[in-house]
Amino acid sequence: MENRIILHIDMDYFFAQCEEREHPEIKGKPVVICVYSGRGGDSGAVSTSNYEARKFGIKAGIPISRAKKMNPEAVFLPVNKELYQDISDEVMEILRGFSQNIEQESVDEAFLDITGNVPDFEAAKELAAKIKNEIRSKTKLSCSVGVGPNKLIAKIASDFQKPDALTIVRPEEILQFLSPLKITDLIGVGKKTGERLNELGVRTIGDLSGMSAQDLIHEFGQAKGIWLKQASQGIDDSPVVGREGTEQIGRIITLKEDTIDPAIIRDAINVLSEEVYGKLAVRKLGFKSVTFVAISADFKTHTRNHTLETTAKDLDVIKTTANKLAQTFLSEHQVLLRRIGVRVANLKQEKGQMTLGEFNKKEIEYI
Ligand code: DGT
Ligand code: CA
Ligand code: CA
């Protein structure tokens, strides 16, 4: 395996941080994001919490009622998935500007393979710092970044000094970095495996790397045994792979003041459409769906979406469709808007410019 440089970006206390951005007045207080079960009252679980709330033991997965006992003064908010999705889109869009070789892992995490973009780990560190700065200046959010020779190390590194951290693990530092860590820090070691290893007296990744492959295979079977042995030594060859078809390109802005004025909204949509079109044109991408996003003065996020009959590539289609969606929305909702956005999805490479995926498919067809 050639020497690679991989980045893992993980947004800090993501859902809670999004809410802090939307409601600056709650910043500094413990904030708890709740998924209510719909059975009424406080039935449901905590989705995440900010670091102030974590000090009270309030964390993802615990019942809301328990969290309220741990700190009745905390700010409890219901999940607002659309808001987090929009901010996630903003973040992924920024990351895409740094490398096309991107694998979005979840709503708030992504891997970037920057092997071809930088000569060494020193330059990678500078690039990682630049990415953190750009995310902060454009989205006002903090993230933690890990830099390593593979995905396994990069991911553990991003988690290592959270929040707002940047951790570099060079190839020669892998063993020293991993050995004191708990086995459950090894992404892929679940609860069951962790418990069994504990019974065997294995606590740290260093302990694990001291076990023979034979013993691990005996205990966990061929595939898992070999994986554990390799992972404990920081070996991971899995590539950074983008998922085709899921990408969206969008842009959201905050209006100078909350408004319902159709002319101001139309002007903003036209500017946003041009920016989105610019991003598409550079990459020679067509699109099949257009979304209008409106965040009202009461911080609710609304979206209106339209799917076209065929893939389009013109600025005019974005403008016209987004404006129509906005008009329909405004005729249904008499609300002041705070932020608005335009997004396109179902992206497709224009003819004559194959994506790598299509190229590979083509090659296979020829064989
Ligand atoms: P972090 O990365 O430790 O600073 O904190 P988060 O909140 O970003 O945690 P992470 O990266 O594991 O998860 C990203 C988001 O996914 C998080 O903000 C909320 C959501 N999430 C995480 N765990 C759960 C869960 O157990 N249930 C639900 N409903 N959502 C979750
Ligand atoms: Ca995460
Ligand atoms: Ca996170």
Image: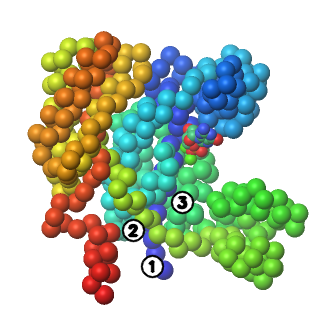
Residue 330 image point, x, y percent: 26, 18
Disc 1 marks which residue? 2
Q: Three-letter amino acid code at disc 1?
A: Glu
Residue 140 image point, x, y percent: 41, 33
Give the camera-side residue of 37 and 111: 37
The secondary structure type at the circle numbered 2 is loop
Disc 2 marks which residue? 115
Query: Is disc 3 in contact with disc 1, using a CB cutoff of under 8 Å?
Result: no
Mark 3 closeness class: few <14, some 14–19, many ≥20 residues within 10 Å: many
Q: Going 35% across and 56% down the picture, which residue do you hit?
A: 245
Q: Is residue 50 above or below residue 335?
A: below
Residue 212 image point, x, y percent: 78, 80
Mark 1 closeness class: few <14, some 14–19, many ≥20 residues within 10 Å: few
Q: Confirm or reject: label 2 Cβ below 8 Å from ligand 2.
A: no
Q: Which sits earlier in the primary sequence, circle 3 or circle 1?
A: 1
Q: CA distance from mark 3 to mark 2?
A: 13 Å
Q: Is residue 297 above or below residue 104?
A: above
Q: Three-letter amino acid code at disc 3?
A: Ala
Give the camera-side residue of 300 and 305: 305
Q: Is residue 99 above or below residue 227?
A: above
Q: Going 68% across and 56% down the picture, which residue do you hit?
A: 185
Disc 3 marks which residue? 154
